[in-house]
Image: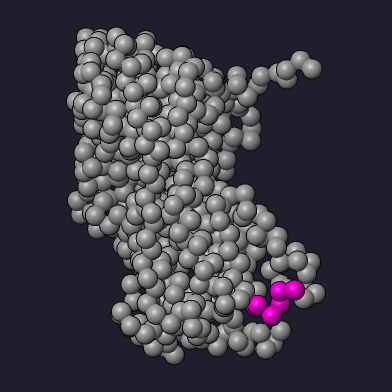
Amino acid sequence: MEAGNKIGSSAHPTSLPPPVRGGASCGTLGRHLARRLVEIGVKDVFSVPGDFNLTLLDHLIAEPELNLIGCCNELNAGYAADGYARSKGVGACVVTFTVGGLSVLNAIAGAYSENLPVICIVGGPNSNDYGTNRILHHTIGLPDFSQELRCFQTITCAQAVVNNLDDAHELIDTAISTALKESKPVYISISCNLPGIPHPTFAREPVPFFLAPKVSNQLGLEAAVEATADFLNKAVKPVLVGGPKLRVAKAQEAFVELADASGYPIAVMPSAKGLVPEHHPHFIGTYWGAVSTSFCGEIVESADAYVFVGPIFNDYSSVGYSLLVKKEKAVIVQPNRVTIGNGPSFGWVFITDFLRALAKKLKRNSTAVENYRRIFIPPGMPLKLGNDEPLRVNVLFRHIQDMLSGESAVIAETGDSWFNCQKLHLPENCGYEFQMQYGSIGWSVGATLGYAQAAKDKRVIACIGDGSFQVTAQDISTMIRCGQRSIIFLINNGGYTIEVEIHDGPYNVIKNWNYSGLVDAIHNGDGKCWTAKVRTEEELKEAISTATGAKRDSLCFIEVFAHKDDTSKELLEWGSRVCSANGRPPNPQ
């Protein structure tokens, strides 16, 4: 084992020759992996060092176009790669064997649920230790190194264990290309003694990937378009509803083209907010059953035909399975399949091809848009607060609305921020992200780090509850170190508000922290960071003015005090319905 350790630590960044463009290179696994990451669009890799990945990290650092960002823990490194992938289209993180791998699992599972290609790289055991009876540190004490791999098999679309240089090139390239094709995370384990060893398969600059485009079955496409057009052209007041799989299908433009051609009103499912332009003249809001945007739910559920494009119908998006939509009225368009009502289903028909072909076949019908405009009443404004009256959450979000522009992006944490942020109207090019399918509290801290690192042209506005923040607070440190200038609104209401509205109990009350004081301690005078405590509307106005003015180049952390029962009306409705769904008695046996 001592010999193995010497081999694994022999490479050093100063001993690596500079990369050579277009000709011979240093020809090592580490160099190949670094170049591959750059080629696919990864410029920043989120990592936590451990003895099994240190040599690999040396090689990543040596790549001039790659920036290695050290995170406080593996969970946040994974969340950061998730946030990065939402902006750049792909993300990457590097951790160490088992103790790091099992720590990052939760974040990778979330990326899988959200169809995000995240390259999860693990520094593995010395290649000489495979197939032996040796027991290694960072394991559970058994001479079986496959525990970590088995855990990743269910939450990644491909796995590669690289412990032999002969097939390392093929394994790495296959895993990365699979992540891009499937839009899912992959797992790559690389033995700690291999990154710095030259091998003939790495003798050249990596040839860029060519990923063959997926092409629809032409006969199936024509049949699906014909049947759908016939179905919709008979309808009186059809509607379009965008779902979260618009992202993985890269079909946002085709969706808008169909909306323009058809004249139908367009709504989004909650998890698709940000994927459809809200400045579109036919946009009517979020369709979320009983907690839809005002007048949107009524238009969708009263339609005699609806086209759901890339939907996910789960217990949360269906508000405890209470949507009033009927299968026989629906056209369901998934990334590679179209199903019409209770009738035919057409496979190997891809969303973009289908929507563009359908747009040419539909008769223009703006009946539902006109109905919406007849019944629409603009939303009311929150009641004006008196002097020194405690700040209300609806007033907070009115001011956040005024901050939004095409140069900003919103990150909404799991909790009441889901509902309050859904009501924000997004200006053109304003980003918006949240994790609805997986719903892991604490996700937003790492995701804000990753998204802000990727989208440096935008200022991220993150809305985070106190309970969620306590899970992942440490990587505020990394944001400061990276010179990020996000604005974080920490909503201090004393507990897990979303859980309270589903099922209350003493476990939903948390120990209160001095959150702004904690961030000041993390800042410690090193870097640009500004904090404020806000209890009234006047204090909020002053804080926002400072954050967008004198401190616009700093990370701004605004701790907002709110009453524990100050929630959106949508959370109250949604929580009671989800509680009812969770509490269904067992079916009779």
Left or right placement of residue 380 versus residue 306 in this view: left
Front residue of 125/99: it is 125
Based on the picture, tell me whether residue 129 belongs to the magenta stretch. yes
Quadrant housing the C terminus: top right
**Residue displayed at 59% across by 54% down:** 105
Residue 496 magenta: no
> Does residue 586 lie above or below 219 as drawn?
above
Q: Is 476 or 439 nearer to us in this picture?
A: 439
Q: Position of residue 82 (x, y in %)?
A: 45, 52
Name the spot of residue 512 as percent of width and height, x first: 53, 43
Q: Nearer the viewer, residue 203 or 309?
A: 203
Quadrant including the N terminus: bottom right
Q: Position of residue 160 (x, y in %)?
A: 58, 64
Q: Residue at x 38, y 54 (%)?
A: 212
Residue 43 vs 364, above or below: the answer is below
* Vertical comparison of 331 with 175: above or below: above
For the point 32% across and 63% down, which residue is it? 483
Identify whether 413 is placed above or below 8: above
Residue at the image position 63 percent from the left and 58 percent from the top: 102
Q: Which residues are magenta?
A: 126-131
Total numbered labels placed on residues in the image: 0
